[in-house]
Amino acid sequence: MPGTSRTIIGCTVSAVLLTLTGCVGTTPTAADVDLGPGPARAGAVKKGALDGVTLTFASYGGIYQEGQEAAAVEPFMAEAGAEVLSDGPTDYTKIKAQVDAKNVTWDVVDTDTLWAERQCGKLLMPLDTEIVDTSRLPEGMAGKCSVPAMSYGVVLMYDEKKFGDNPPKGWADFLDTAKYPGKRAIPGIASDLSPGALEAALLADGVPPDQLFPLDVDRALKKLTSVRSSLVFWDTGARSQQLLESGEVSMAMVWSGRAYSAVKNGAHFAPQWNQFMPVSDSLAVPVGARNPKASMALINYYLGAAQQTRLTELTSYSPVNSDAAPKLDELGSQYLTTTSERQAQALRIDNAWWAENQEQLIQKWSDWLAR
């Protein structure tokens, strides 16, 4: 999630004070925190349970973090009595440095889901399921150490003017340049690789959806090579959106938010949701956080239906609580990825496999792009 850091809320931002205090968790200690009786319920926290507690929430800045603060962080402060400082942007080297130095100043962090999966039990602590209620999350989206912060998807977009009478039915059609001629846009970031192009290539090469993992990477790259002359690579979300709006391509593999923005701006494209690939950011607590119970309580509150509804209305990202009911315009509603209808169309991605193999795959992907 691109963004810029925001002013730290509730903390004097002079360099001197930050150096002296670190803006870190304060009294009472974790042992003193009483979150009340009964099972956890997403979106709820005992009134005044965290009076005197200070936490720091780190995310990616910009409209996204502003939405997180307005929808969840600020109401949490009012309800729980905690002071929550905001920092960012999320930086994995900073998280590692804090954990290694046993001086953790970020209590809840918004991270990439694959990174969170890879760092579970290393830099990130397991969720306390006595405090964090994951029962209203989409199936398969909660990890051992993290929960989704929001969701979107990698979706197939096609030119309605060209293919409206016979729209593509999935990723096999996306890479069928004989049946559907024209240029295709796919992510082409040399320093990054995540679910998308490899899965689409294997599906197009005849691999059944339930047999994709472990991915046969060489087979996938061979398939992509066979249609490479028809591929256009984008390296930013803005570029992918521009390709749709300019009509430079006939189809595109893009993030759903960018697809929505392009269509809203007049692009004559439509989505094919069959086999779309869910994507999410994750919330997690670093190992060594000074008040893990309070940190988990913030995550649990963030997952509430009301909080997720508001977050979607402020940012257009899809809510991760199945009871959320955001009020969006008709077009915006069509691009929500966490409805029961959309989830039934989603391709199941093995995030654990991706987390284990992503770093090695990036080098192979980079080499292929450079050919």
Image (spheres, helix red, strand yellow):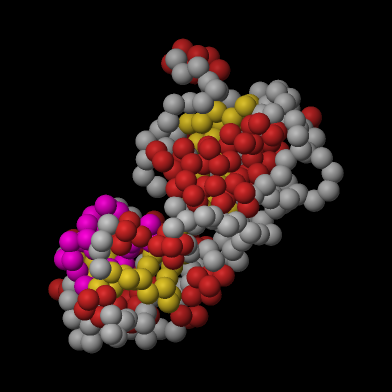
Quarter of the image where one finds residue 259: bottom left
Confirm whether the magenta stretch covers residue 296.
no
Quarter of the image where one finds residue 71: top right
Say which of 33 and 135 sits in front: 135
Image check: 44 left or right of 345? right
Position in image of residue 340 (x %, y %): 57, 70
In the image, the segment drawn in magenta is: 233-259
Image: 164 above or below 55 = below
Q: Residue at x 60, y 56 (%)?
A: 324
Position in image of residue 209 (x %, y %): 46, 80
Residue 35 shows in the view? yes
Q: Residue at x 44, y 15 (%)?
A: 14
Position in image of residue 7 (x %, y %): 44, 26
Q: Residue at x 53, y 20 (%)?
A: 11
Which residue appears farthest toward the right when viewing the image? 37
Confirm whether the magenta stretch covers residue 234.
yes
Quadrant for the C terminus in the image: bottom left
Say which of 139 and 223 sits in front: 139
Say which of 299 and 100 sits in front: 299
Image check: 364 left or right of 243? right
Say which of 262 and 30 sits in front: 262
Q: Residue at x 69, y 34 (%)?
A: 79
